[in-house]
Image (spheres, grey):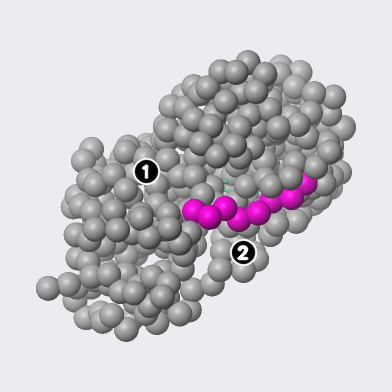
Amino acid sequence: MADAYVAIEGDRVIEARARAPGTARGELVFTTAYTGYEESLTDPSYEEQVLTFSYPLIGNYGVREERFESDRVHPRAAVAREMTDDVAEWLASEGVPAVDHLDTRDIVTEIRDEGAMKCGIAAGPDVTEQDALDELHECKHMSDHTDIGAQVSVDEMEVHNEGGDGATVALVDCGAKGSIVESLVERDAEVHVFPYDASEDDVAAVDPDLLFISNGPGDPQNFEQAGELVETYVGDVPLAGICLGQQVVANALGGETEKMEFGHRGVNQPVRDLRSNQVVMTTQNHGYTVADPGDKLDVTQVNVNDDTPEGLENDDLNIITRQYHPEANPGPHDSLGFFDDVLGMAGE
Ligand SMILES: NC(=O)CC[C@H](N)C(=O)O
């Protein structure tokens, strides 16, 4: 008998098995990644989403903190065909509801046909279908989470690798994955991690060689202050961005972003570099895209599947951004050279 329910738009309720108890709501999305569940579940970009794994068995190599991308689980709930006890117990200890024993192919097909959608989840011995429906009816559209940055950013500036020999990087933390900081520190950068709403004066105080806008959850248009930093620094200091960072940079420089139907989430998204014609496999996790790069940025890389912009650049203004995740974790390491390129702009 079912002891968990997933309610999706149209008030359809899918029965499941409770693996971690509780009720939750969020935007229902799926990832096709076949490894990296620890990294995905701790990626702050999944804040306010319910993550469905299309790969059928989640948890088969345990749960190790050294693979976490932040200090907590970010999706509001997790959905899998089959989840191991390790993962279920971890999610339960974090208070994040989880369900399995349902047809995840059905959910993926529904999202592909209808687009990412609101959902409600109720899991545990005492829950009813109505509990899941109540959650669904309370669920907000992702763009209506207007201060989502506050949920994922540092409260105070933090310095990593103080006294490092390399560039001084001002990383605006819109929900940064730990691997981005690590990739910069490994290249000797002194990384100042700023709150998502840091002021121009805060950033100016460290006299950065590079302004870097991180990945993050929700609608990039809700990160106005990060956009203002981009407007302030463009032309004076090199600019870099990953995922939400690319979107914020584009919006700040006269471009436009829009919501995609169901986005790209996985570890084998092919990206073509338009100058070298080389294709690399990339890790992705985004539901918005740059619809118009504006007149300051050139599209230098595109997604092979749907031609959406994956890289934006301006050689004169020293700007390089990526829609995908060059830091990987999970996923292929093919584009780690991005970090050498952006630190190269900063004189390293
Ligand atoms: N990983 C990210 O930075 C995601 C960016 C943005 N929240 C999107 O969904 O498009």
> Residue at label 1?
32
Q: Which residues are magenta?
A: 255-262
| Secondary structure type for disc 1 | loop
**Badge number at residue 114:** none
* Residue occupying the point 87% across, 32% down: 236
Q: Position of residue 277 (x, y in %)?
A: 60, 18
Nearer the observer, 17 or 213? 17
Does any atom of ligand 1 lie closer than 8 Å to the CB of label 1? Answer: no
Residue 5 is situated, as x and y percent measured from the top left of the image, at 27, 72
Circle 2: residue type: Ser
Name the spot of residue 144 as percent of width and height, x first.
Answer: 62, 69
* Residue at x-position 50% and y-position 23%: 280
- Residue nearest the observer in this picture, 120 or 210: 120
Mark 2–mark 1 distance (CA, rounded to whole Å):
24 Å
Q: Which residue is mark 2?
A: 143
Point 60% across, 28% down: residue: 184
Helix, strand or loop at mark 2? helix
Left or right? Give the position of 242 relative to 293. Answer: left
* Residue 205, quarter of the rendered image: top right
